[in-house]
């Protein structure tokens, strides 16, 4: 896989973006030349209100607002942008959907649009246009947002979640990098622990970090919450294997991970208390931009890698998926669509990714060629976040059941119970099965 | 006033200033006036209290989801919650949290109030200082506690380690029972000032003559506390503890910031679980049912303090009947 990608990058290097025609695995990644144009005419006097999740890295917000200003300049459409902590966007979006008024556009997460698809404006035309022009969407985008032959919202990207580690500590433990298989990964963690530089992964009710790595782990062994028909199948031999592995892995963790919420691993890592965790690129960004010389120095030692691949033989990551919804109640549907189209165009999207140093991974394959992914090799693993991820309701469909199961931390709790030894793997899987069955009963 | 000279057959309809007589009488009626004056307050209560409470209760009996209206499902949500191990655990957690925290807050609050009631130097200043934990927004003090309890950065663990009392950091929020006790400690820290200051106000209303008389009769300090202070304080204790229990039972912010209900759901209270189910989870009906399920417990707490602590006979020196 990586050889292919490198070959592709070599091929495309130096070729002006938009004219390159190279492929990986038979997929056209070039900016589609013959893509049909989409000309949207914003309504006269249109004004838009956008609600988005609050930035994780400052560069994101600064550039997003610059792009918004450019849109206003180009179209005359005024745009007001409000931001809220990402976990608070969901209730606000839900209220907007319920009462039929609120922001015209909401940048949400995961499967929000699947909770109220009928309240959302069909954006199939914009999606088709972008897909044709920019090499198509990754499969996971369809899983999240394509329903009954239409796009209910537009993918924005995802916050990639990779292994973040201290290169010197991994070397000191006798490894040249992070092993790509599960057995090797466990050995690395054991060696790190033995050296007094343990790993640490969140096992508290951490909405982002907790869900990401526990889903990866269970999926890597072939366990899954539901099958394609939404039957709960979590209590399986594969899951048990994953949980037994989790129990072994947990022994190597720094103390206190059962209570860790989203910020804990960042703090512990930057303080040098753990040498390996799973996180967005924000740790690296925080270190690079820190005014504290000690933390700044750390940036040189930080490395990233994709999560190891388990017995299923393919990547099984879960990343924080971002969508863009236009609500039907908007008075300016054309302006709203034009706004999303404008923000996803190369001129805006690439710079935005660059300013956020790759915090958001693209949903459109063409943007794999964005220089942000290669300007610093440490960015590269995040480039593939969308390619290597599965939807959280895997292998079933998205909707209330998948949303509830994740919101109730069924997967995180199961792994935490088995890892900490408070329940045996079998008991933990049975309990998760019972809890999930309640949500999938309808 | 009726205009003179009018025949009995033609009853006067208007006053000299043009107001209909019947309307004027209507407005002169004390009951009508009372009702009118109460209207604004009544409307506010109905709009902002009764309606949301009623809607919440109604939602608890429907299968409403975020973005979708619900249909009446009777007791389905309650049956579901009763069979749900996490919901049952949250009920236990809530009761444990409320009972332990309330008792601690009462004992410490009363003790603090009695200390503050003595003639101390800088009395006013000290009393103001004591109120601080109550004044600081809960979310902020919760963040302070989050750092105090941090598995890696806890200053408590650091101090204990430096003092040579422990060798590894205490995992305050990582071990279920320790997490429960740690969250209770944070709640008590925040709640004690409210109890203390209110009881202090109560203490100051007790006439000094009672203590003088008791002293003349040779009462010990304990007897003065037991036979004068406590009975005289019971009405205010009833009020302050009712409020304290209500605040504790419905606590949300502290848990949400500290643990989000973890580890392994051991600190999930009914309020936090209700939010988790209704908003991030999208199951409005289930969340509302969980919130509604809190009401009987709250009513029981209110009734207990109302009837249990308002013991007038005891206050007047007789024994209860």
Image (cartoon, rainbow, N blue to C red):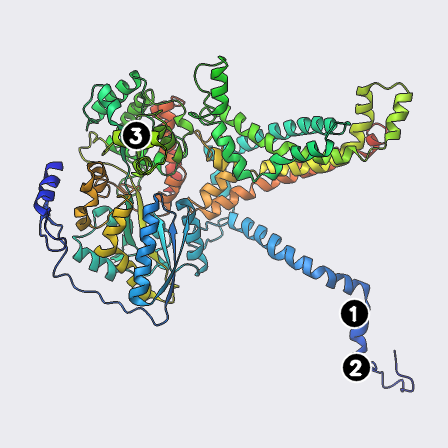
C-alpha distance separating marks 3 and 1: 79 Å
Residue beneath disc 3: A298
Q: Residues within 10 Å of mark 1 (few under 14, many from 20)?
A: some
| Residue A306 tag number | none
Circle nearer the viewer, 3 or 2:
3
C-alpha distance separating marks 3 and 2: 88 Å
Q: Chain of mark 1?
A: B
Name the quadrant containing residue A166.
top left
Residue beneath disc 2: B18
Q: Quadrant of the N terminus of chain B?
A: bottom right
B73 and B260: which one is in front? B260
Instruction: Tell me, yes or no, if residue B252 can be seen here.
Output: no
Name the quadrant containing residue A280.
top left
| Residue B27 tag number | 1
Residue drawn where x is 33% and y is 60% of the image: A69
**Left or right of A203 in this view: A133:** left
Circle nearer the viewer, 1 or 2:
2
């Amino acid at each position: 896989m990586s050889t292919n990608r490198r070959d592709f990058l070599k091929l495309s290097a130096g070729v002006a973006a938009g004219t390159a025609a190279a492929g990986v695995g038979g997929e056209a990644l070039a900016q589609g030349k013959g893509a049909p144009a989409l000309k949207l005419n914003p309504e006269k006097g249109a004004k838009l209100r956008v609600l988005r999740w609050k930035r994780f890295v400052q560069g994101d917000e600064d550039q997003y607002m610059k792009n918004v200003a450019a849109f206003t300049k180009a179209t005359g459409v005024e745009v007001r942008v409000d931001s809220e902590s990402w976990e608070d966007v969901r209730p606000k979006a839900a209220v907007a959907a319920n009462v039929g008024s609120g922001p015209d556009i909401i940048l949400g997460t995961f499967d929000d649009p699947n909770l109220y698809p009928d309240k959302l404006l069909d954006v199939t035309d914009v999606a088709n246009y972008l897909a044709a022009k920019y090499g198509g969407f990754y499969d996971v985008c369809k899983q999240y947002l394509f329903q009954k032959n239409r796009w209910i919202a537009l993918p924005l990207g995802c916050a990639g979640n990779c292994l973040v580690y201290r290169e010197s500590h991994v070397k000191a433990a006798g490894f040249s990098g992070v092993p790509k298989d599960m057995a090797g990964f466990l050995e690395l963690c054991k060696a790190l622990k033995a050296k007094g530089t343990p790993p640490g992964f969140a096992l508290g009710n951490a909405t982002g970090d907790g869900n990401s790595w526990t889903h990866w782990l269970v999926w890597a062994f072939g366990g899954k919450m539901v099958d394609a028909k939404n039957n709960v199948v979590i209590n399986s031999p594969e899951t048990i294997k994953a949980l037994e592995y989790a129990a072994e892995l947990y022994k190597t963790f720094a103390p206190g991970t059962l209570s860790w919420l989203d910020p804990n691993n960042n703090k512990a890592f930057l303080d040098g208390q753990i040498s390996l965790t799973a996180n967005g690129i924000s740790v690296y960004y925080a270190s690079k931009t820190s005014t504290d010389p000690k933390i700044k120095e750390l940036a040189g030692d930080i490395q990233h890698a994709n999560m190891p691949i388990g017995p299923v033989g393919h990547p099984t990551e879960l990343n924080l998926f971002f969508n863009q919804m236009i609500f039907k109640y908007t008075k300016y549907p054309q302006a709203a669509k034009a706004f999303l189209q404008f923000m996803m165009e190369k001129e805006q999207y690439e710079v935005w990714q660059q300013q956020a140093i790759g915090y958001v991974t693209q949903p459109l394959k063409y943007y794999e060629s964005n220089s942000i992914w290669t300007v610093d090799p440490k960015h590269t693993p995040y480039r593939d976040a969308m390619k290597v991820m599965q939807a959280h309701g895997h292998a079933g469909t998205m909707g209330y059941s998948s949303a509830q199961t994740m919101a109730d931390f069924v997967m995180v709790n199961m792994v935490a119970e088995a890892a900490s030894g408070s329940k045996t793997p079998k008991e933990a899987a049975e309990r998760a099965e019972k809890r999930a069955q309640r949500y999938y009963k309808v | 006033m009726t205009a003179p000279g009018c025949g009995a057959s033609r009853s006067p309809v208007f006053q000299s200033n043009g107001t209909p007589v019947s309307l004027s009488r209507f407005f002169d009626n004390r009951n009508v006036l009372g009702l009118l004056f109460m209207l604004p307050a009544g409307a506010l209560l109905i709009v902002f209290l009764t309606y949301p409470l009623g809607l919440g209760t109604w939602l608890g009996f429907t299968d409403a989801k975020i973005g979708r209206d619900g249909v009446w499902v009777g007791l389905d949500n309650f049956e579901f919650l009763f069979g749900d191990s996490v919901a049952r655990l949250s009920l236990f957690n809530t009761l444990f949290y409320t009972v332990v925290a309330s008792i601690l807050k009462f004992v410490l609050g009363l003790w603090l109030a009695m200390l503050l009631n003595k003639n101390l130097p800088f009395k006013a200043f000290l009393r103001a200082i004591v109120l601080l934990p109550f004044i600081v927004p809960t979310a902020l003090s919760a963040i302070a506690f989050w750092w105090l309890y941090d598995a890696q950065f806890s200053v408590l663990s650091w101090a204990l380690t430096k003092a040579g009392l422990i060798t590894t950091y205490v995992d305050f929020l990582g071990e279920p029972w320790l997490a429960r006790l740690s969250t209770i400690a944070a709640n008590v820290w925040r709640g004690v000032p409210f109890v203390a200051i209110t009881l202090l106000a109560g203490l100051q209303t007790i006439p000094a003559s009672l203590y003088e008389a008791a002293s003349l009769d040779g009462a010990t300090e304990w007897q003065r506390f037991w036979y004068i202070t406590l009975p005289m304080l019971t009405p205010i204790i009833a009020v302050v503890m009712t409020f304290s229990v209500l605040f504790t039972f419905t606590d949300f912010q502290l848990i949400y910031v500290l643990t989000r209900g973890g580890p392994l759901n051991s600190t999930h209270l009914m309020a936090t679980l209700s939010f988790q189910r209704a908003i991030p989870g999208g199951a409005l009906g289930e969340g509302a049912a969980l919130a509604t399920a809190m009401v009987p417990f709250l009513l029981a707490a209110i009734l207990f303090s109302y009837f249990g602590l308002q013991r007038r006979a005891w206050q007047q020196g007789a024994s209860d009947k």
